[in-house]
Amino acid sequence: MPWRMARRVWPYLIGVGLLSLMSGCSLYQKPQRPAWRAAAENACFAEKRIQLSAYVQPAPELEGPGICGLTRPLHVTALQGGQVRLNSRMTLDCPMVAELESWLTDVIQPAAIARFGQPVVQINTMGAYACRGMNNQIGARISEHAFGNAIDVGGFVLADGRAIVIRRDWTHGDEQTQAFLRDAQGGACERFTTVLAPGSNAFHYDHIHVDLAMHGSTSRGLRRICKPALQNVAPPPSRDNLPEAPDLEEETDSAQLKTYPGRDYARAAPSGAVPPTPPLALGPRNLSPPREVAGSGIIRADGAFDPDDDSTSTIRMR
């Protein structure tokens, strides 16, 4: 019996010993997330880039499996103080929420007003936090979704209830709808470090993926990935029903005029000469009694001498 028991115990002891050795050599240590992720979250809160509200609420720290998770996650149900809903609650990190707010304020809403005459009231998302590989592929490099640092946008809903669906409208929408989606992509490329829209690859045919991954730096700042290449889009429609303004006429140099409104100067000005200034209409308070001096012409009401008027030798003050 003792021999049989020893045969059973020895494998167990050997296994424990190997685990102890691995632990002592730090080979059994849990994988750690890159330090910059927690630093970015903490900096975002310290700089007060977001405002906590009924729609943006702190959530418990997410740990694992593996290196998945967030230090200070947020549960988000709406943006812009509740004016723009999300179709479901998303778990995101602070920097992503801040950039989404900026994207909405500076790009999405102005484009929607210009092209549709109304704002966006809902974003239809297709995922945020998820511990998975890129493009949901087994064995692929871990996705930014695994850190709450990405979101997939599937479409928008306007104030009148109209739904803009990226899967359908990216290529089959009317001119203004397609232009609006390109506006959204272009504005995203200025704020996020990764933007993958339909046409970038086979996995993004129905949504726009945006994230804040660290791709390194260049001489011009952070390296950004923006696919497909941005396109020129149609201008927004005119919404005031007014005709286009006429072309501006070139301003006239009054010094070259031979006549002036209100008085006809029959005598043409010599070449290169400056023509006289037309009389000014002044009120009664500027009247003064006439006075006579030798010579011809008049002193106009503006105080300038006019030698062209030789009808009298009296210089009149008008």
Image (cartoon, grey):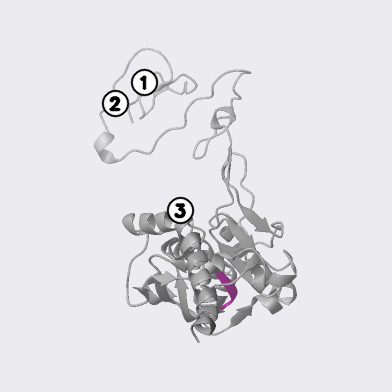
Task: For mark 2, give the secondary structure.
Answer: loop
Task: Say which quarter of the image contains residue 196.
Answer: bottom right
Residue highlighted by disc 1? 314
The answer to whether mark 1 and mark 2 are in CB contact below 8 A is: yes
Amino acid type of disc 3? Trp
Amino acid type of disc 1? Thr
Sequence-wise, the earlier of marks 3 and 1 is 3
Seen at 40% across and 18% down, the residue is: 313
Q: Is residue 109 visible?
A: no
Residue highlighted by disc 3? 36
Dot 3, how many residues are within 10 Å of its Cα: few (below 14), some (14-19), or many (20+)? few
Q: Between residues 10 and 162, which one lies in front from this camera angle? A: 10
Q: Position of residue 134 (x, y in %)?
A: 64, 67
Seen at 53% across and 35% down, the residue is: 260
How far, Cα to Cα, is label 3 from label 2? 89 Å
Q: Position of residue 208 (x, y in %)?
A: 62, 69
Which stretch appears magenta?
Answer: 151-156
The answer to whether mark 3 and mark 2 are in CB contact below 8 A is: no
The answer to whether mark 3 and mark 1 are in CB contact below 8 A is: no
Quadrant of the drawing holding the C terminus: top left
Seen at 30% across and 40% down, the residue is: 283
Count of marks, rendered view: 3
Task: Say which quarter of the image contains residue 280.
Answer: top left
Amino acid type of disc 2? Pro
How far, Cα to Cα, is label 1 from label 2? 8 Å
Q: Is residue 226 visible?
A: yes
Q: Position of residue 95 (x, y in %)?
A: 44, 60
Sequence-wise, the earlier of marks 3 and 2 is 3
Asked whether 192 falls inside the magenta stretch, the response is: no
Q: Residue furthest top?
A: 294
**Label of residue 290 in the image:** 2
